[in-house]
Image (cartoon, grey):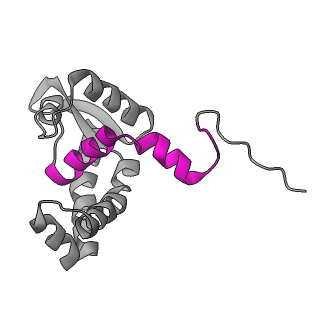
Amino acid sequence: MVAKKKPSPKWRSGCPLNASVEILGDRWSLLIIRDMMLRGFRSYKEFLESYEGIATNILADRLRKLMAHGIITTGRDPLDGRKVIYSLTAKGIDLAPVLTEMVLWAAAHEETENPALVQLIKKDKEQFLAAARQRWAGKTVALAAK
């Protein structure tokens, strides 16, 4: 008989979907990742200025959680060493296909805006994902080298 792996104590169950939901299941975490991935946001100030209007205490909490789960990392701004900038990790970049499918799903089933983004993704999804990975891979490597 093969020993069954026990669920990690930090998750409610061993279900992979449950782990994903517990890490990313609140709206703010996904919107922070969206802003990083699609808009290139890297600073606390940029996240605060996003049009959904996240509160400072919630933003600080979600950034800490995303760092704790290895989705994002921090570094110093090369132009101003006093400022902290955030970067997607390889694990965070791996969420690009998930967010892309969520955008396409919502556009197909709900009234949404930003048809240009939807068309760009539909035109060549693999190219869109490759560009997102390339854009962040360079920033992640640059941060790690400092």
Who is closer to the viewer here, 75 or 92? 92
Assess whether residue 49 is covered by the magenta stretch. no
Can you give x and y, in whole percent of width and height, for residue 18 in the image? 54, 47
Q: Residue furthest right?
A: 1
Predominant SS along the magenta part: helix
Can you give x and y, in whole percent of width and height, for residue 90 in the image? 38, 51
Q: How many marks?
A: 0
Residue 96 in the figure: left or right of residue 68: left
Where is 84 relative to 70, above or below? above
Where is 39 relative to 113, above or below? above
Q: Which quadrant is home to the N terminus?
A: bottom right
Residue 79: image quadrant is: top left
Where is 139 relative to 2, above or below? above
In magenta, the rendered stretch is: 11-39
The residue drawn where x is 23% and y is 66% is 107
Residue 124: image quadrant is: bottom left
Where is 34 relative to 115, above or below? above
Residue 58 in the figure: left or right of residue 79: right
Can you give x and y, in whole percent of width and height, for residue 87 in the image? 27, 41
Assess whether residue 21 is covered by the magenta stretch. yes
The residue drawn where x is 64% and y is 47% is 14
The residue drawn where x is 74% and y is 47% is 5
The residue drawn where x is 83% and y is 50% is 3
Q: Which quadrant is home to the C terminus?
A: top left
Q: Residue furthest bottom?
A: 123
Who is closer to the viewer here, 68 or 48? 48
Residue 64 in the figure: left or right of residue 56: right
Residue 61: image quadrant is: top left
